[in-house]
Amino acid sequence: MTMFAETHTEDAFETVIEAHLLRNRYVSVDRKSFHRGLAIFSEFMLAAILQTTSGESRLRKLEALHGDKTGEQILGDLCKWMDQNGSLATLRHGVKCYARTLHAALVGSGANSFDARGNLHAGPGGQL
């Protein structure tokens, strides 16, 4: 194998891309948290939705209806919504859960947000 072939592998290409993204406010998500059945990072998405709606009456109403099953209901509705409307539209416009719109991103200065391509950016300091 030549030196060129050793440095131009798919692994090397992915490593360079990952390094660039991580230097530019993207965050790494543990691949073990990927839920194959739902095809999402379920814990991550639920945390983002709950963080976005924390303390709001719409979340309290959902919790009153579903109790400790609220997270499962939100994730189920999220997946149905993405199947019907697509992932990008869902990230941009939110998901309806019992007639309440929920969002999975905090938008604004200093907050975590999704870009136009649906990639999550951490706020200042890299915290999600």
Image (tube, rainbow, N blue to C red):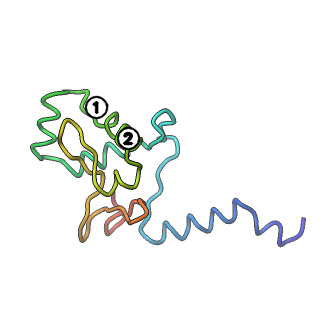
Question: As displayed, is residue 71 above or below residue 91?
Answer: above
Residue 106 or 82: which is nearer the viewer?
Answer: 82
Q: Earlier in the sequence, mark 1 or mark 2?
A: 2
Q: CA distance from mark 1 to mark 2?
A: 13 Å
- Residue 85 spot, x, y in % from top left: 37, 47
**Nearest-to-viewer mark from 1 and 2:** 1
Numbered badge on residue 73:
1
Residue receiving disc 2: 43
Residue at 36% across / 63% down in the picture?
Answer: 122
User: Based on the displayed image, in which of its 4 quarters is residue 26 positioned?
Assistant: bottom left
Q: Is residue 55 left or right of residue 29?
A: left
Three-letter code for the amino acid on which mark 1 is drawn: Gln
Three-letter code for the amino acid on which mark 2 is drawn: Glu
Residue density around tag 1, few if under 14, some if 14–19, many if 20 or more, within 10 Å: some
- Residue 107 spot, x, y in % from top left: 25, 63
Residue 62 or 18: which is nearer the viewer?
Answer: 62
Residue at 58% across / 67% down in the picture?
Answer: 17
Residue at 31% across / 31% down in the picture?
Answer: 72
Question: As displayed, is residue 86 above or below residue 27?
Answer: above
Question: As displayed, is residue 8 above or below residue 33?
Answer: below
Question: As displayed, is residue 104 above or below residue 73?
Answer: below
User: Based on the displayed image, in which of its 4 quarters is residue 113 positioned?
Assistant: bottom left
